[in-house]
Image (spheres, rainbow, N blue to C red):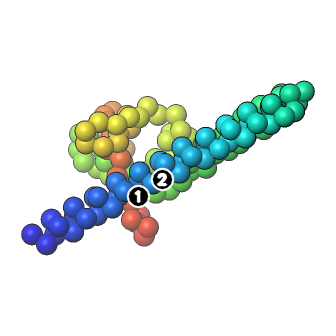
């Protein structure tokens, strides 16, 4: 019974941390977009420069976010249950989504070699998956 309570506390904490992280990312992108609009209104002749800077900031932010996700999350095969990690580029381009069970990514399992929706799982800091 105690283990179930600890598990529920960990799950609710994970969801709270995840919500805070997503809220922070959304706020970051809103600030970047508002800054871009203000700079375009203040200096309209340099709109192309501001657009290039905005595009660069967005691409670098995406790269940092995917890199963070690659380091902190692993995947569990939907067919055999094998837990595995993927590389940065695969994490960047593979299809993904959410359902009632959580996040998933469509991947090929390195153990059973079948493609399925692999569940996203958070890895501990000292894990060697």
Quadrant location of residue 61?
top right
For residue 62, the mark is none
- Give x and y (percent) for residue 10: 28, 63
Q: Is residue 21 above or below residue 101?
A: below
The answer, for residue 105, to whether it is visible in the render is yes
Closest to the observer: 114 or 91?
A: 91
Q: Is residue 55 left or right of residue 72?
A: right
Q: Residue at x 80, y 31 (%)?
A: 40
Element type at mark 2? helix
Quarter of the picture containing the C terminus is bottom left
Q: Residue at x 35, y 42 (%)?
A: 103
Q: Is residue 13 left or right of residue 91?
A: left
- Give x and y (percent) for residue 72: 46, 57
Q: Is residue 121 above or below residue 107?
A: below
Residue beneath label 2, please? Answer: 21
Mark 2 surroundings within 10 Å by alpha-carbon count, few (fewer than 14), some (14 through 19), many (20 or more): few
Q: Is residue 18 above or below residue 49?
A: below
Q: Are marks 2 and 1 in contact (CB under 8 Å)?
A: yes
Q: Is residue 45 above or below residue 112?
A: above
Mark 1 surroundings within 10 Å by alpha-carbon count, few (fewer than 14), some (14 through 19), many (20 or more): few
Closest to the observer: 129 or 18?
A: 18
Element type at mark 1? helix
Residue beneath label 1, please? Answer: 17
- Give x and y (percent) for residue 31: 65, 44
Q: Is residue 15 left or right of residue 125?
A: left
Q: Residue at x 48, y 53 (%)?
A: 21
Measure the alpha-carbon separation of dots 2 and 1: 6 Å
């Amino acid at each position: 019974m105690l283990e179930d309570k600890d598990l529920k506390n960990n799950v609710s904490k994970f969801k709270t941390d995840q919500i805070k992280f997503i809220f922070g990312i959304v706020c970051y992108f809103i600030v970047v977009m508002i800054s871009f609009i203000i700079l375009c209104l203040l200096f309209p002749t340099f709109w192309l420069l501001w657009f290039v800077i905005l595009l660069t900031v967005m691409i670098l932010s995406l790269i940092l976010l995917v890199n963070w996700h690659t380091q902190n999350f692993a995947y569990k095969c939907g067919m055999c249950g094998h837990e595995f990690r993927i590389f940065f580029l695969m994490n960047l381009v593979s299809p993904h989504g959410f359902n009632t069970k959580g996040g998933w990514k469509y991947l090929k399992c390195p153990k059973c070699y079948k493609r399925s929706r692999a569940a996203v799982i958070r890895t501990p800091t000292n894990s060697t998956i």
